[in-house]
Amino acid sequence: MWSYILRNLLQRLVLLFIVSVIAHGVVHLAPGEPTQVDPSNPRMKPEDIVKIRKAFHLDEPLHLQYAYWMRDLLSGELKSFKDSQPVLPKIWDRFLNSLPLFILATIIVWTLSFPTGIKAAIRRGSIYDRSTAFIAYTLISVPGFFLSYLAILWVVAVLGVPVIGMRTFGMEDAMPWFQGMDRIWHLVIPSLMSALGGIAVLSRYVRSQMLEVIGQDYVRTARAKGLPEDQVIYHHALRNALLPFVTMFGFLLPGLIGGSVIFEQIFAWPGLGRLGYDAILSRDFPVILTINFIAAALTLAGTFVSDLLYAVADPRIRLH
Amino acid sequence: MSQKRILKDGTPLLKVEGLTKYFPVHSGVFSRVTDQVQAVDGVSFEVYPGETLGLVGESGCGKTTAARCVLRLIEPTSGQVQFDGEDIIGLGRTALRTMRQHMQIIFQDPYSSLNPRMSVGNIIGEPLRVHGLVKGKEYEQRIDELLERVGLAPDTRQRYPHEFSGGQRQRIGIARALALNPKFIVCDEAVSALDVSIQAQIINLLKALQEEFGMAYLFIAHDLNVVHHIADRVAVMYLGKVVEMAPVDELFMSPKHPYTQALIAANPIPDPDIGHDVVPLSGDVPSPLHPPTGCRFHTRCPQVMDQCRSLEPELNQSGEGREAHGVWCHLH
């Protein structure tokens, strides 16, 4: 068991290294450099460009640039090209901003999808099943940003609730209670909007998993035992249907990073997704690469956790 | 080969009358019901306390559907099922659950019919807990007892179904069915998925348990030798209908229905003293979607007559109760 975990971790470290090398290559292969972002800027003289390129090691070969980046990242001295601020604290701040959005959206998705999907599976072919299917496919088909703009229009015009950004400016002197309510109001619509697509997809997935399990022989066995229907559904069927979702849970972690680039952009939410988006536009290589690196690390950590959870959840999968 | 038990007359434990199950066939854009599969059509039989009724027939003739309708694991389309004097079909959900204590089932596939996420102890013990039959220490004791009774070590209770072989799993299934002390157990092809040597072990276990606890079996099988070995009486099904029903020895020695004769003739019995006229059957079983009119067997019957094609045969019965030999055939 322990040797399995150790081996698994080592493999993932190697994988992480490979991912970072490829990401580094891709970012540098893409056209554009920090110096070329604004070529019409009159202050950018050729000698300045040479100076900047030298300062950022952009004139050196790729593998050396990778080494510089790694060295700075590990020593914590990595600085943004754009504003020379340390990258890690910058990412951490944005991460804390993204976190409530991510947590609330995740809670909404998982708490709504399961009851919806299970009920649809139990009443297969009913009006409930058909109407949830219709709504789900509508939500999957309609782009999230479109719905978001509609939601903004509606919320602002009808309810008079502010939705842009994380808080209303000029409320710093207000009572803590008002500030808190203001924050919650700002949080609700973006997290609901980014959850909608997830609910639609996950509830369909739950439904198909449940349908598959409900037809199994051991569910019939449970009925033959004379168990109450609830126990048959939730104890025997659902527990077996849950297995694939353990894997999905592992993939949630990287969603912390890039989960809501679009929604943070629409709602002007100063989160990680927007940081990455802005960094790409300004060719801020250290920020792009570090966010990518953390996302890769989280993905690997997430799949590692779901591997372990698998063994806990399913006695047939034993780690030796 | 077969143990002839003293057949006492009495009131039947289970009385099935005119049991019918049609499965609707959906098709078209709006998936309307366009047709019906007549899986079980007017089946009647009785099971007496402590006896084994064998139910035989080809694959797809409705044996399993009939048995599941009896337990209401499938809702029958029509018909009467009386268990211990109580009408099973009319029972509400709660009453039906209580009734399940007394009527259990052992499934064909020991691999898929046990929940892979539950330990053996839980699989066996769950019905005990749900029906509130035992408490506390007694609970653990009862599980150990059941495991031991079916020939498994008590320390297997913490293990999971995938750690067992097919025969062992079927023993778990039997222990689970036994847990509630039922009066009646349906063995739905309980040994068909097992090796022949394991089959014998399980059948002997089932027989020993019956002698010990006195429950009745409805034993579904397509292997005539197995049925000959375990059953007291046998019902033969063809295409959703019972065509012949008789005490086991009588059925094997003097089958009356041409279908039964063909089945028995086709069955290799390792005994040169039992002679049979070989009746070859041609053709396939017709579709239960549109079963033949008249006698359903007329399309393949070697002794078919004109009236067989249009007239449904009536029951011709000799003897009473457990000794009755009934046949549904125009020849008799």
Image: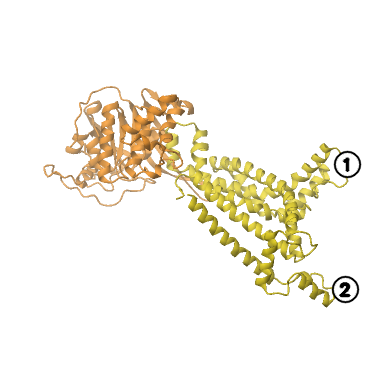
In the image, residue A56 sits, relative to residue A103, either above or below, namely: below
Q: Quadrant of residue B155?
A: top left
Q: Which residue lies under the disc numbered 2?
A: A42
Residue B158: x and y in percent read: 41, 37
**Does the image show residue B133?**
no
Task: Please state which of residues A244 and B261 is positioned toward the viewer in this rendering.
Answer: A244
**Does the image show residue A141?**
yes
Residue B165: x and y in percent read: 34, 45
Q: Count residues near mark 2 (Cα–Cα under 10 Å), then give few for <14, some for 14-19, many for 20+.
A: few
Q: Which residue lies under the disc numbered 1?
A: A173
Q: Quadrant of residue B194?
A: top left
Of label 2 and label 1, which has the lower sequence position?
2
Q: Secondary structure at mark 1?
A: loop
Task: Please state which of residues A226 and A302 is positioned toward the viewer in this rendering.
Answer: A302
Task: Please state which of residues B139 and A225 is positioned toward the viewer in this rendering.
Answer: B139
Residue type at mark 2: give it: Pro
Q: Residue at x 55, y 40 (%)?
A: A123
Alpha carbon separation for disc pair 2 and 1: 42 Å
Q: Secondary structure at mark 2?
A: loop
- Which chain is depicted orange? B
Task: Please state which of residues B57 and A218 is positioned toward the viewer in this rendering.
Answer: A218
How many labels, in total? 2
Q: Residue furthest left?
A: B273
In the image, residue B39 sits, relative to residue A298, either above or below, namely: above
The hue of chain A in the figure is yellow
Residue B287: x and y in percent read: 36, 48
Q: Chain of mark 2?
A: A
